[in-house]
């Protein structure tokens, strides 16, 4: 059984860090550059760029979805956040690269310290330090932050063609995936109506032009999907919205069938993808254009300002409308989660039938993908893709938060251990993401305690009630409180937004220490607290949740919102110490398991139904649990 949507080859090669750094530094000398910036980015700031844009991974060996590297003639610094602190040490050559915390010591702060030190052996004290960067990979916001942090008497930012492209001899070709139309029964709203609403919003802001750089916003606005980025149905494109005329859509026409091209020509004037700069230069003279500084590259800004235009900072106006799902998207998500829940539960049943030590992480991923494919067919649907490379972590590998199994790292699911599986599917009617941590044999007693504390945090989010105006940051501590009481925490956010057959990580909403966005009815997020013991096990419990409309509470004086849990799969009772749960927590768990059993049983075999009956047995504080 072989996975169709995921391979297990090692895409990281940290062993070549020294020679690649040497080649890069040689080019830096030729260009008279003292530093070179290497973001994890493409020109659209996709979280998962096409493979030809994996410059950070090629140079360093680090393959995480968030990272940065600064190379000087003496230093090579890799910046990662808490999700990747363990992974990065395994992937890069620690003799060549140093690691810094992306949040505590971000690149602009490190550069500030470096510029002030004046200790670079290749730099004369009286000269400015020249910092090279690719203007297509650096956003307006990022450059602004760098310039604000640095003294222009000490440093100079120099835009150049990408140096890594000159030394990456086997760089893959640019993606050429086909484009499809997202049916209205899934989108809920015609693209023409979405564009009309956007034009009205721009008119209200006295704007006549708006540039969209985010392929997800373009996909949602025009009701199209693509296949240019890994596991995310996006096509690389730009759009300029004009309030008084058709939008301009910059897209590679080779990706369009006759049907798709005919559809898009009814919505926009189509131009070759590479002609953005040319057409923008014609259009912008003495005019203003709105754009999102966090998504738009310096190269585009230079075209505007170089042709007597003005850029006005604005949040991507499509961001919030696509985050707030309409009734068709919400119902589609429910149906996608029903199918996905059946597949995941069949997989959990299968895992339980395998003797400990008989399967490995790759076999598990293959089985789960097979279940998703087959289950979708039985529902007369189709698994279009997985929503990200499945995180299949046995034992100590589960403690690597964003672990990706390869043939080199593949571990066996051993007896008396934990197994963490974080996965999701891409269906036309919805995107899913679910994590279950599973006991293999008899779990360690300390693991049961850790798991139960994580479960308490998960339930706290699921049960949360909150007024209009509540932000993700206001709820984040709910998921951590029980862990904090025992001196534990996790180094990632509690929840991220989810797209509608789009990105598995979608803003602007999230539940985290930094999220300032107000939660609104129709938003879908993940609820995924965790805990990780390096070298032993990882624990995460993840369901997707939908923000519900405000409701009155008997005896209350304000309307409050809450969450509907969308994901359907049992939570392992063998890992729960029910004596640690409050009555309200037990009630939620038992009610959730009752709902799971009711929804999934009609789609399971008799043996699977019997297994699910046992896996969802109601717990009480008085009775011993399955782990006792």
Image: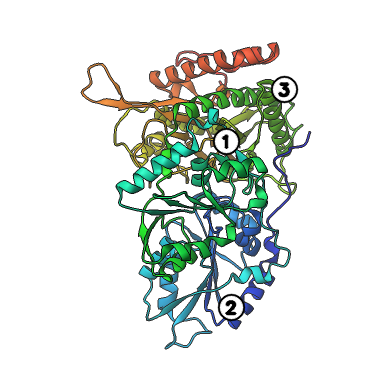
Quadrant containing the N terminus in the rendered view: top right
Q: Residue at x 37, y 81 (%)?
A: 153
Observer-nearest residue: 270 or 22? Answer: 270
Disc 1 secondary structure class: loop
N-term mark: 1 or 3: 1
**Circle 3: is it few (<14), some (14-19), or many (20+) Cα within 10 Å?**
few
N-term mark: 2 or 1: 2
Disc 3 secondary structure class: helix
Distance Cα–Cα, label 1 vs label 3? 39 Å
Q: Where on the picture, by quarter, is residue 165?
A: bottom right
Q: Left or right: where does residue 181 sit relative to residue 172?
A: left
**Circle 1: is it few (<14), some (14-19), or many (20+) Cα within 10 Å?**
many
Distance Cα–Cα, label 2 vs label 1? 45 Å
Q: Are marks 3 and 2 in contact (CB under 8 Å)?
A: no
Nearer the observer: mark 1 or 3; the answer is 1
Q: Residue at x 42, y 78 (%)?
A: 155
Give the x, y percent position of residue 378.
69, 21
Observer-nearest residue: 12 or 299? Answer: 299
Observer-nearest residue: 133 or 462? Answer: 133
Distance Cα–Cα, label 3 vs label 2? 57 Å
Q: Are marks 1 and 3 in contact (CB under 8 Å)?
A: no
């Amino acid at each position: 059984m072989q996975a169709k949507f995921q391979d297990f080859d090692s895409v990281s090669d940290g062993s070549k860090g020294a020679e690649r750094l040497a080649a890069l530094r040689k080019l830096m000398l030729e260009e008279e550059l003292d530093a070179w910036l290497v973001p994890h980015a493409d020109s659209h700031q996709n979280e998962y760029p096409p493979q030809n844009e994996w410059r950070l991974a090629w140079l360093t060996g680090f393959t995480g979805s968030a990272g940065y590297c600064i190379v000087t003639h003496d230093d090579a610094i890799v910046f990662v956040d808490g999700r990747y602190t363990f992974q990065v040490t395994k992937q890069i050559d620690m003799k060549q690269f140093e690691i810094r915390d992306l949040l505590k010591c971000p690149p602009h702060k490190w550069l500030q310290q470096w510029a002030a030190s004046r200790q670079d052996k290749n730099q004369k004290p009286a000269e400015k330090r020249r910092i090279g960067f690719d203007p297509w990979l650096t956003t307006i916001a990022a450059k602004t932050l760098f310039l604000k942090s640095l003294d222009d008497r000490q440093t100079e930012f120099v835009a150049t063609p990408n140096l890594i492209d000159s030394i990456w001899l086997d760089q893959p070709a640019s993606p050429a995936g086909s484009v499809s139309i997202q049916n209205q029964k899934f989108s809920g709203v015609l693209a023409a109506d979405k564009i009309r609403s956007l034009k009205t919003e721009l008119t209200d802001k006295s704007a006549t032009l708006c540039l969209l750089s985010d392929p997800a916003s373009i996909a949602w606005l025009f009701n199209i999907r693509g296949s240019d980025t890994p596991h995310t149905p996006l096509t690389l494109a730009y759009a300029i919205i004009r309030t008084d005329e058709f939008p301009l859509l910059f897209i590679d026409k080779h990706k369009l069938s006759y049907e798709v091209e005919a559809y898009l020509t009814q919505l926009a004037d189509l131009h070759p993808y590479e002609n953005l700069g040319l057409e923008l230069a014609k259009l912008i003279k003495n005019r203003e254009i709105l754009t999102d500084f966090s998504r738009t590259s310096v190269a585009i800004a230079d075209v505007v300002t170089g042709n007597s235009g003005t850029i006005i900072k604005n949040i991507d106006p499509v961001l919030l409308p696509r985050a707030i799902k309409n009734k068709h998207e919400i119902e589609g998500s429910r149906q996608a989660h029903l199918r996905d829940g059946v597949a995941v539960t069949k997989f959990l049943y299968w895992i339980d039938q395998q003797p400990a030590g008989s399967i490995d992480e790759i076999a598990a991923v293959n089985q789960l993908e097979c279940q998703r494919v087959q289950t979708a067919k039985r529902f007369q649907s189709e698994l279009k893709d997985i929503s990200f490379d499945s995180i299949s972590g046995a034992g100590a590998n589960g403690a690597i938060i964003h672990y990706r199994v390869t043939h080199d790292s593949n571990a066996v699911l051993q007896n008396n251990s934990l197994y963490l599986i974080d996965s999701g599917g891409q269906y036309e009617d919805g995107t899913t993401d679910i994590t279950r941590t599973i006991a293999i044999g008899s779990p360690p007693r300390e693991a049961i305690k850790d798991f139960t504390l994580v479960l308490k945090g998960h339930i706290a989010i699921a049960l949360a009630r909150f007024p209009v105006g509540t932000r993700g940051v206001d709820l984040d501590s709910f998921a951590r409180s029980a862990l904090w009481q025992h001196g534990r925490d996790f180094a990632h956010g509690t929840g991220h937004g989810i797209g509608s057959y789009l990105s598995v990580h979608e803003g602007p909403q999230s539940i985290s220490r930094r999220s300032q966005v107000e939660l609104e009815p129709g938003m879908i997020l993940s609820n995924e607290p965790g805990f990780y013991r390096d070298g032993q096990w990882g624990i995460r419990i993840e369901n997707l949740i939908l923000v519900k409309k405000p409701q009155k509470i008997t005896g209350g004086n304000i309307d409050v919102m809450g969450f509907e849990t969308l994901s359907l799969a049992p939570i392992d009772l063998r890992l729960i110490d029910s004596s640690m749960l409050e009555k309200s927590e037990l009630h939620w768990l038992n009610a959730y398991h009752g709902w799971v059993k009711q929804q999934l049983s009609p789609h399971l075999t008799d043996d699977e139904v019997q297994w699910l009956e046992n896996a969802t047995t109601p717990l009480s504080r008085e009775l011993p649990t399955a782990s006792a």
